[in-house]
Image (cartoon, rainbow, N blue to C red):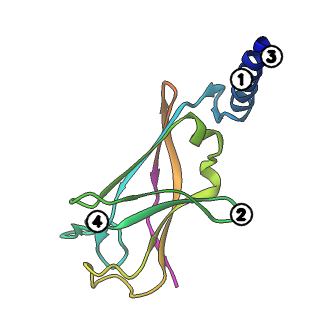
Amino acid sequence: MASTHVSLPMISLFFAAAVLSTLALKVNGITITTGHIDGFLYCSKSGNQEPGASGIPRTPVEVVCGAANATITSVFTQPNGAYVFTFNLLDTALFDPSTCYIKINLPIVSCTLLPTSGILRGPIVVFNTLGQTLNMGVRPLIHIA
């Protein structure tokens, strides 16, 4: 009986590893183990960088994916308006950049230049891979009422 109890967890671990390896995101034949998205949120009429625009701090930014528009993860912007998302192996197994976008809910109290309702939304684009890291960014944000 003792060997049955020991083998069951080993079988479960093997099964979990096998499932993760089949779900992994691959780009040009390379299995991606880390994903990285970064960008800035500015106080401007569009939320994008314009001359003289300052970064918007402490604002929630979400990564939303799929037909269900599910929020995968969220972060707050840094004091300069920067945001950074880092994904691990499990996250990238469920992540398809072509179905994902950045979402920022309005209003943002600290920026009166932005609309007072709706969302800012920007598509996620792949810039490059560096080893097993997929580096991504966001195209210009658009306002959706």
Q: Earlier in the sequence, mark 1 or mark 4?
A: 1
Q: Residue at x 41, y 80 (%)?
A: 106
Mark 1–mark 2 Cα distance, whole angstroms, equals 35 Å
Q: Earlier in the sequence, mark 4 or mark 2?
A: 4
Q: What residue does disc 1 label?
A: 9
Q: Secondary structure at mark 4?
A: loop
Please name the amino acid that badge 1 sits on.
Pro
Asked if residue 142 is among those painted magenta in the image, a careful observer would answer yes
Q: Earlier in the sequence, mark 1 or mark 2?
A: 1
Please name the amino acid that badge 3 sits on.
Thr
- Foreground: 60 or 41? 60
Q: Is residue 14 above or below residue 114?
A: above
Neighbours of disc 4 within 10 Å: few (<14), some (14-19), many (20+):
some
Q: Is residue 116 above or below residue 81?
A: below
Q: Secondary structure at mark 2?
A: loop
Mark 1–mark 4 Cα distance, whole angstroms, equals 43 Å
Neighbours of disc 1 within 10 Å: few (<14), some (14-19), many (20+):
few
From the viewer's perspective, is the residue at label 4 or at label 2 nearer? 4
Q: Where in the figure is residue 81, as x and y percent of width and height?
A: 27, 61
Q: What residue does disc 4 label?
A: 58
Q: Secondary structure at mark 3?
A: helix
Tell whether label 2 touches label 4 (CB within 8 Å).
Answer: no
Asked if residue 49 is among those painted magenta in the image, a careful observer would answer no
Please name the amino acid that badge 2 sits on.
Ala
Q: What residue does disc 2 label?
A: 67
From the viewer's perspective, is the residue at label 1 or at label 2 nearer? 1
From the viewer's perspective, is the residue at label 1 or at label 3 nearer? 3
In magenta, the rendered stretch is 137-145
